[in-house]
Every structure is written in structure tokens, then in C-alpha cells.
Image (cartoon, coloured by chain):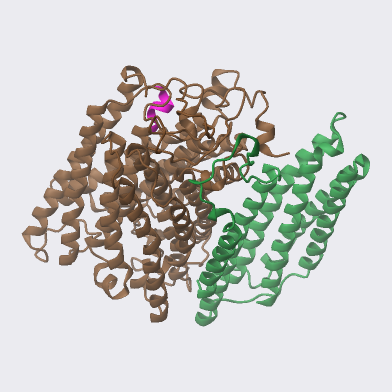
């Protein structure tokens, strides 16, 4: 029997009976989503503090005696890995994926709730193992977030004993957690959509999360393979990746291993990972722009196809991260070509976002500000990607600050702006209260202008040839202006970091004191805003599942009496039926 | 990683695209179904567990595909540098392979029994399938021991390291399957559980067993051919 037919019956679905089953060992997708989000944001704050440590060192070298070179490299490594994997991937898929997929598809829950619960707890275990590295002898690994061998497990690298083992084990555990969650997300989208919710009526948020999950399920095994093989190299003395090297005057037992093999495996995961983070952001920002511009998304079909095309192409561009590792020129040509090709569907999305705004009834709400901010930062980050995708341009720029600026703009700042926009947008549904608007605007402007103050100068430094990965730039090799620019970047970074406290305060304060939101404060069309209760209760929909009659973007429909028609309003029903408790 | 992998990924993407294209050409802004003509949303009648298993097998395929790609690349490097020393595959692996094939066949017969509702036959065949799989795993451990007694056994020999790694990962997947198998056997021992109730689980176990047999045959072929 089809899943929907089963779920449409009025019966309890793993109904929580106690405080523990409701809030701790919960199988409810909404609670699991919040557990994922809180954990991801908490570990993300650790990564933020690490970036502050890095910036203090770079801006004011030799001022803070407690920051030794090894600390700096450990901070760089842990900041990178935490932000990419444990914050962004976990938050977009475990957090927003869990919360939005069942609600937007009209399902009562994920199709495998127990496995979903397990996914979160295994993720938490991965985080704890990672954090354990900070407290073990030698501290966390300082090998750089790409963990390249032979350096990662060679004597002399910070954390080469316990730190790297914690990192590799934690990654392997994370991948197990992600696989359990990912199976849920994909199967729920395929099997548990309510009646009328065809694939082409799904909101783009679901499309983005769906495709990103497929990418993750196929790409994370590459990281798993490399993590297991490197763990064996480090512990039992195999030589999968470790070549014969003389380290600190001694010749370890390894010989013949291939560091390049690790790089291929790592980037076969690493490049799709960019889109594992970017595709949910693309989907969510599309929905934010459409809702707050009161206009249907421009080119919906093209947007879906672009998501699929980007997903497929993301598997054939990985070696553009390895131009400087040495490769056959034909390989370089191939990967430069595919890299430029992937820019086509990506650019198409940017055009469609801008065209969605064109002649829209733009409401400059806080989520909308973040969404528009994303278009700016993503365009800037994407354009510099075109430079680096070309072999001849990449080779001189690869080891410079240009790369740091590029990837922070494109997959650091841009997705984070979407995360903020999404939280401001869906917080009212999660809690029943609005976030404070003034604090939100303050948070946006400081963050948006601040990240430009950080990363624009980094592009400039990179083009001048200032190398990345250095502990300090105070030798005679660098002009004093490099140092003064670095100091200004640090000041901007500190301001942006402190501004995040405004956001955290807003989250906590609004939980109790925020304005009551009602069921559909943004007057949105998608199903999550049409639940009978806000926040939605267990099972989401009361006795009957919703039925969908239209796509997710019926905004400002000519002839309609209101400027939005929810997906569950039947055709010919006249004026839109406002959702329960709507404050429209 | 060779260009072949890249083209394979591209080909897979194209195939998926072709499969989806019929569903992805709808113009959702034009169609508004009348109340009496609602579509189910395109979800298939397959149970979610079956879809979930197929998706998981995709993950397993990716995992073993990457392990084998790594094997191939490391072997090419190792042969060039002279640190890759092929070793004679223990003959016991042939017997292990036979055990796993019989285990897979027993699971298939158990599935047929479940479809018919034949309780005793189901329990017997299911038990046989699991026990043969356990025999396979014990046999693999013995093969490990056999290799450890040879002159080729050294951490620095990647051929041996890969042998242990690949068989361990495959064995762990089988152990995972045995957990589900044990829970199914336990369920079927309860008097109020009918064979038809376990039809889905037994069917999924069967698919999983066949798939892991296929993976093993590919791995075994790889070990034999190198």
C-alpha cells in the first residue's frame, strides 16, 4: 500500500508518551531537526572562536603569546572542518532537511523515524569524538582541513598522534550518521509526499535538500574510504597513502604510498561537498525570494533542472582542486572545461533569482535582506571561481589569499547568510513567535558589510601574491602594507564575530518575548505554513493529511483576492483560504 | 582516479536524467487538478523500506567502487615502485564463496516460502541462509589467518593490506545483514507472527544477500586477477 494511504489514517505515529521520548530520544522529525540545529550551531560557535584566534594572530602577530604556531595551524584545521562538515552540512540537511521535508511534502514524519533519531545521536557522537581531540595529548590535528598525507600523520605536525585519529574516526562516524539521515530524506521525498504533491510541485527548498542528500550519499563514501585507509596508515603501519619519507631525521616504516590517491579520494568527496552545502542554500533562497517578493519564482522548471545538472556535474570537476599537485595537461583541460560548464546552470539560477525580484512587490523583511545579501556574495564568490577554474590562472593564485577569499565567499559566507535568512523565516513556525526585527536588521547589516570588509581585501592581497597558510607576515619578505591590511581585516572579523551575539540573544529573547507569529506570518503558500497548529504538533496535520492542488509559487495571481494562494487551496475556491491563525 | 570514473559518473547522471525527464517536464504553474482527479503525487506503490534499501545499495556501490578504484590506483603505483607484492589467494576462499552462494540461494528459497506462507519451510531456509553466511564469515577469518602465516604478510605490502581491508568491510556489511536476519528469525519464533507478516523483511534480506554476494564475487575476481 502506498505510504500516503497508510499515513492518512487517523492513528498515532510513534506517539511520544514521556518527557524523554518527546524531547530527548525523540523520533519526531521536528525535535530531531532542532537537536541537529542546536548541536551544529554550538560546534559552529567553537569554529567561530577558532577563527577569531586565527585573525588575532594574523592581525596582531607576536602580540598574543598564548598563540603558538602549532595552535594557529590547529585552529585553521578545526575551523575549516567544523564549518564545512559539522556545521553547514549538518545544519542544512540534518536541521532544515529534517524540519522542512515532511512539512513541505505533506507527510506526518520521516519514513524511518527510529533511524532518524539514531542519525542525530550518532552525529552527536561524531561531534564529541572530534571535540575529544582538543583534550588529548598533542591537541587536535593541525594538518590543514584537507588532511593531506604525508603531513597529516607525520611526526612534527600538530596533533599527529591523537588529534588526527580523533578527526578521522569522527568523520567516519559522521558519515554513518549522515547515511542514516540521508536514506530518510531521499525515501521520504520519493514515497511520502501527500496527494497532489507531484515532483514538479515541490518547493525548491525540498529539491535542493533532496539533490544535496543524493550527492552526500554518493560522495561521502569517498571520504569514508580515505578516512579508514589513513587511520590504518597511522595506526597499523600500512602504506596506502604514506610514501617513503625521512621525517625529523628518521625514516618511518612507510614506503610507496600514494598521497595523490588520497587527494583524488578527498576531492571526489570534497567538490560535491561544496554543492551539498550550496544546493540546499539555492533551494531555500529561492523560496525566501519568492515569498518576500510576492512573486512566483522565475523559471521554476529551469531551476529544478539546474539543481539536477549541478548535482551531476559536481562529480566530474574534483581535480580542479589539484592543478598544483601535478597532472597530465589533458586532465587539466578536461577538469577546467567541466568546471566552466558547471558555471552555466549556476549562473542560470542567479539570473532567475534576480528576475524573480524584477517587478516583484519586494518586502525588505529580515529574511529577504539575507536572501538578497546571498545573491551578492554568491555572485562575487562564483565569479572568482571562474578565475580559479582555469589552470593557468589557478597555478599562480592557488597558494594565495585569493583562494581563501574565493571559497569563503562562495561556500562560507553565502550559505551562512541563507542559514540566517532561513532561521528568521522559519523561526515563527518552529516557536510560534517572531524574531525581533530591529535586532535582525542590525545583525544583517553588520554581518553583510562586515564580510565584505573581511574578504574584499583578501582578494586584493591574493592578487598581489600574499601566500596563505602563513603564521605571520612580519618578515622582510612582505611590505608593511600587507600587515596593516591584515590588521583591518582582523578588526572587521572581530566586529562580525561579536555581531553574532546579537543573533544568539535574539534567538533566546524572542523565544519568550517575541511577538506572537500566528500560523502564517509571511503569508506564504507552502504547506508548512498551513498546519493546523503552530508550532506543528506531533503528526503535523491532525486527522487528515493535506491535499495539494497547485505549485508552491502562486503569489500575486491575477484576479485572486489576496496576493497568495496556498498549495492546499482547491482551484475555483475563490479567494484564498487563509491558514489557521494567519496574521495576514 | 581515472577518466573512466568520471565518464561513468557522467553516464549515470545522464541515465537518471533520462528516467526523470518525463516527470520533470510538467508545467506546474498551468495545471491545477480538479478535486476528483488528484494524482497521488507520483509516489510509487513500493514500500518505503524497499526504496530505502535500494538507496542504501547505491551507497554501498559507491563505497566498494571507490575502494576498488583505490586498489587499482595503488596497485599501479606499487608495481611501479616495487612495493606491491601479489600473494597467492588462499584456496579456502573458494569454499567460502560456495558457502555464501548457498546462503544467498537459501535466502531466495526462504523468500519463496514466505510468499507461500509456509512457516516451517521459511524458518528452516532462513536459518540455513544465516548459518551459511556465518560459515562464510568464519571461513574469511580462517583465510585471514592463512595469509598471516605467509611471507607476504607485512603491513608494508599494500596487496595484503587491501585484502584485509576489503574483506573486513564486506564482512561488516554481512554482519549488519545478520543483525536484521537474527531479528527476523526471532520474530518468526513468536506464535502470533505469520510468515506473510515477515514477507517484506525476508524479501529485503534476500535482495541484500544477493547484492553482497555480487560484491564479493567482484572482489574475489579482483583478488584473483591481480
Question: Is residue A60 among the parts visible in the rendering?
Answer: no
Name the residue furthest left: A480
Name the image quarter holding the N terminus of chain A.
Answer: top right
Image height of B187 relative to A399, above or below: above
Q: Nearer the viewer, residue A373 or B172?
A: A373
Q: Identify which residue, A8 or A535, lies in the foreground.
A: A8
Quadrant of the image occupied by residue B79: bottom right
Residue B211, image x, y percentages: 72, 58
Q: Position of residue B5 (x, y in %)?
A: 54, 70
Q: Quadrant of the C terminus of chain A?
A: top left
Residue in the image at 54% along x and 56% along y? A218
Q: Is residue B95 visible?
A: yes
* Residue A428 in magenta stretch: yes
Q: Main secondary structure of the magenta part?
A: helix
Residue appearing at x 57%, y 30% in the figure:
A546
Outermost residue toward the front in this view: A559
Which residue appears at 56% of the width and 24% of the height? A538
The answer to whether residue A478 is above or below residue A437 is below
**Nearer the observer, A128 or A548:** A548
Above/below status of B2 relative to A518:
below
Chain B: give its colour.
Answer: green
Is residue A571 a member of the stretch shown in magenta?
A: no
Estimate the x, y position of residue A415 in percent, counting from the top left: 34, 47
Q: How many marks?
A: 0
x and y percent of residue A297 in the render?
A: 39, 46
* A113 lies left or right of A374: right
Read off the magenta span. A426-432
Please tell me which residue is depicted at 79% across the width and 68% down the height of the picture: B94
The colour of chain A is brown
Amino acid at each position: 500500500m502506498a505510504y500516503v494511504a497508510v499515513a492518512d489514517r487517523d492513528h498515532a505515529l510513534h506517539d511520544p508518551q514521556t518527557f524523554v521520548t518527546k524531547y530527548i530520544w525523540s523520533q519526531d522529525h521536528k525535535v530531531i531537526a532542532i537537536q541537529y540545529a542546536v548541536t551544529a550551531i554550538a560546534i559552529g560557535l567553537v569554529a567561530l572562536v577558532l577563527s577569531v584566534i586565527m585573525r588575532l594572530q594574523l592581525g596582531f602577530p607576536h602580540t598574543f603569546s598564548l598563540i603558538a604556531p602549532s595552535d594557529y595551524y590547529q585552529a585553521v584545521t578545526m575551523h575549516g572542518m567544523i564549518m564545512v562538515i559539522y556545521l553547514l552540512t549538518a545544519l542544512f540537511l540534518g536541521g532544515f532537511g529534517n524540519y522542512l521535508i515532511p512539512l513541505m511534502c505533506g507527510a506526518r514524519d520521516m519514513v524511518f523515524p527510529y533511524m532518524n533519531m539514531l542519525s542525530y545521536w550518532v552525529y552527536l557522537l561524531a561531534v564529541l569524538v572530534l571535540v575529544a581531540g582538543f583534550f588529548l595529548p598533542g591537541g587536535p590535528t593541525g594538518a590543514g582541513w584537507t588532511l593531506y598525507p604525508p603531513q597529516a600523520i607525520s611526526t612534527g605536525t600538530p596533533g599527529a598522534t591523537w588529534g588526527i585519529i580523533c578527526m578521522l574516526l569522527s568523520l567516519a562516524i559522521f558519515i554513518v550518521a549522515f547515511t542514516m539521515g540521508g536514506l530518510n530524506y531521499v525515501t521520504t521525498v520519493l514515497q511520502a509526499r501527500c496527494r497532489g504533491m507531484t515532483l514538479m510541485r515541490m518547493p525548491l527548498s525540498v529539491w535542493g535538500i533532496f539533490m544535496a542528500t543524493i550527492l552526500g550519499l554518493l560522495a561521502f563514501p569517498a571520504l569514508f574510504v580515505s578516512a579508514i585507509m589513513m587511520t590504518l596508515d597511522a595506526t597499523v603501519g600500512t602504506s596506502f597513502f604514506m610514501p617513503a619519507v625521512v621525517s625529523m631525521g628518521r625514516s618511518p616504516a612507510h614506503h610507496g604510498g600514494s598521497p595523490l590517491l588520497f587527494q583524488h579520494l578527498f576531492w571526489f568527496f570534497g567538490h560535491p561537498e561544496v554543492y551539498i552545502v550550496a544546493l540546499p542554500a539555492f533551494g531555500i533562497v529561492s523560496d525566501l525570494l519568492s515569498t518576500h517578493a510576492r512573486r512566483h519564482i522565475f523559471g521554476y522548471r529551469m531551476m529544478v533542472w539546474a539543481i539536477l545538472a549541478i548535482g551531476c556535474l559536481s562529480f566530474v570537476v574534483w581535480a580542479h582542486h589539484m592543478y598544483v599537485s601535478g597532472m597530465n595537461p589533458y586532465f587539466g583541460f578536461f577538469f577546467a572545461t567541466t568546471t566552466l560548464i558547471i558555471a552555466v546552470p549556476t549562473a542560470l539560477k542567479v539570473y532567475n533569482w534576480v528576475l524573480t525580484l524584477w517587478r516583484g512587490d519586494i518586502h525588505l523583511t529580515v529574511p529577504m535582506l539575507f536572501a538578497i545579501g546571498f545573491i551578492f556574495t554568491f555572485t562575487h564568490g562564483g565569479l572568482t571561481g571562474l578565475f580559479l577554474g582555469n589552470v593557468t590562472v589557478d597555478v599562480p593564485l592557488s597558494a594565495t589569499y585569493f583562494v581563501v577569499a574565493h571559497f569563503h565567499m562562495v561556500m562560507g559566507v553565502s550559505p551562512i547568510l541563507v542559514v540566517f535568512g532561513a532561521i528568521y523565516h522559519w523561526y515563527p513556525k518552529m516557536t510560534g513567535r517572531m524574531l525581533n526585527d530591529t535586532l535582525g536588521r542590525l545583525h544583517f547589516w553588520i554581518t553583510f558589510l562586515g564580510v565584505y570588509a573581511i574578504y574584499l581585501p583578501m582578494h586584493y592581497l591574493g592578487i598581489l601574491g600574499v601566500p596563505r597558510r602563513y603564521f605571520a607576515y612580519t618578515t622582510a619578505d612582505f611590505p608593511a602594507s600587507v600587515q596593516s591590511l591584515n590588521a583591518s581585516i582582523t578588526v572587521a572579523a572581530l566586529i562580525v564575530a561579536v555581531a553574532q551575539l546579537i543573533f544568539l540573544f535574539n534567538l533566546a529573547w524572542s523565544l519568550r518575548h517575541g511577538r506572537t507569529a500566528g500560523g502564517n506570518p509571511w503569508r506564504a503558500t507552502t504547506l508548512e505554513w498551513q498546519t493546523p497548529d503552530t508550532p506543528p504538533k506531533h503528526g503535523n496535520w491532525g486527522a487528515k493529511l493535506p491535499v495539494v492542488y497547485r505549485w508552491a509559487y502562486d503569489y500575486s495571481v491575477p484576479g485572486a483576492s489576496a496576493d497568495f494562494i496556498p498549495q492546499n487551496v482547491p482551484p475555483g475556491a475563490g479567494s484564498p483560504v487563509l491558514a489557521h491563525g494567519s496574521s495576514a | 582516479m581515472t577518466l573512466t570514473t568520471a565518464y561513468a559518473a557522467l553516464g549515470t547522471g545522464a541515465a537518471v536524467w533520462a528516467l526523470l525527464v518525463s516527470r520533470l517536464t510538467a508545467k506546474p504553474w498551468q495545471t491545477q487538478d480538479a478535486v476528483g482527479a488528484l494524482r497521488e503525487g507520483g509516489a510509487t506503490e513500493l514500500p518505503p523500506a524497499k526504496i530505502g534499501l535500494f538507496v542504501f545499495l547505491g551507497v554501498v556501490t559507491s563505497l566498494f567502487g571507490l575502494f576498488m578504484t583505490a586498489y587499482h590506483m595503488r596497485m599501479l603505483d606499487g608495481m611501479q615502485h616495487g612495493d606491491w607484492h601479489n600473494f597467492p589467494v588462499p584456496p579456502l576462499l573458494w569454499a567460502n564463496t560456495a558457502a555464501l552462494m548457498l546462503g544467498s540461494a537459501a535466502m531466495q528459497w526462504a523468500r519463496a516460502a514466505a510468499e507461500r506462507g509456509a512457516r516451517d519451510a521459511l524458518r528452516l531456509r532462513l536459518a540455513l541462509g544465516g548459518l551459511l553466511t556465518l560459515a562464510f564469515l568464519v571461513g574469511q577469518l580462517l583465510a585471514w589467518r592463512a595469509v598471516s602465516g605467509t611471507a607476504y604478510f607485512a603491513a608494508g605490502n599494500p596487496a595484503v593490506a587491501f585484502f584485509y581491508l576489503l574483506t573486513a568491510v564486506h564482512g561488516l556489511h554481512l554482519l549488519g545483514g545478520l543483525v536484521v536476519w537474527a531479528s527476523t528469525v526471532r520474530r518468526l519464533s513468536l506464535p502470533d507472527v505469520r510468515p506473510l507478516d515477515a514477507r517484506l523483511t525476508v524479501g529485503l534480506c534476500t535482495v541484500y544477500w544477493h547484492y553482497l554476494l555480487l560484491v564479493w564475487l567482484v572482489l574475489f575476481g579482483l583478488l584473483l586477477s591481480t
